[in-house]
Amino acid sequence: MKTMPTLRALTCALALAAAPLVSAEPHEGDVHPLLPCATAKAGCTIELDDLDDKPQDAATGYAIFEADFGDFPTLFSTDDPGFEHEAGQFIPGTILGLTAVAGLEFWNGSQWLSAPPAGETVTIKDAQENLLVIGAGAPPLGTALIGQVDAAGDLHRHIDYLVTSGASVGAYLITLQLVGLEDDLVTSIYGASLPFMILFNRGLAVDDFEAAVAARTAPIPLPAGVWLLGSGLAALGITRRRT
């Protein structure tokens, strides 16, 4: 893992990394952060835009973004989803970053597991090539830096996600939050976004991967006891009406 650069070097490098990429249309698969305030200012909470077409996790309500390990020429990395927002949304100089809020989960083709079968990890390589490694269990500490908002308040960046080389075929899921930091990389300018999920395909056929997505979004069945309680209350209501 690389050592942390000096603040001056970090700020300069982030400014270069934050240069907007040329793009005719916003990428539909990207994460689109926004501020609900009338003007970009400190104290707002980051929100996520354009979630109407995104599936939601049934247990948490978190938006799910889909990606695919296997970007040419590698089989175990991707730079999707990226991060893009409209100009003027954020205070220029803001550094956007990611924190992990849960451990890595794995779909084995029939069920979601709390740990991959061979101890695989998903690693975020940030704008400074520092690594945030997410494995099973408690989420790692630290922030993966996306980039620095430019003078126009604009940012469009893609950073790298890597799964362990030779990783088991299946789907891998990480849960993240967006944060906005001052250039000391510690002080928060905005409230962190609600968590969101990125669900990566690793070698599954399209239909099998969509089954993994569907298993996250399917309604959660109520325990049998809840149904019995509901039936009992309904019966009680009928008895009272008859009385």
Image: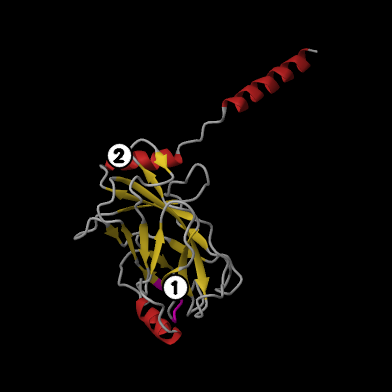
Camera-side residue of 18 and 182: 182
Residue 179 place in picture, x, y as percent = 51, 67
Q: Residue at x 52, y 74 (%)?
A: 181
Separation of residues labelled 1 and 2 (CA atoms)? 38 Å
- Nearer to us of marks 1 and 2 is 2
Q: Amino acid at mark 2?
A: Asp
Q: Please, is residue 186 above or below residue 60 in the view?
A: below
Q: Quadrant of residue 3?
A: bottom left
Q: What residue is disc 2 on?
A: 208
Cβ–Cβ under 8 Å for marks 1 and 2: no
Residue 6 horizontal side relative to residue 234, left or right: left
N-terminal-most mark, 1 or 2: 1
Instruction: Give the residue furthest to the right.
Output: 243
Q: Residue at x 49, y 64 (%)?
A: 141
Please check the rendered image and state whether residue 173 is part of the magenta-colored stretch, yes or no: no
Q: Which mark is residue 87?
A: 1
Q: Residue at x 45, y 50 (%)?
A: 52
Specify the quadrant that holds the N terminus. Answer: bottom left
Residue 116 place in picture, x, y as percent = 37, 47
Q: Residue at x 38, y 60 (%)?
A: 30
Write down the region rendered in magenta.
Answer: 151-155
Specify the quadrant that holds the C terminus. Answer: top right
Instruction: Give the residue furthest to the bottom.
Output: 8
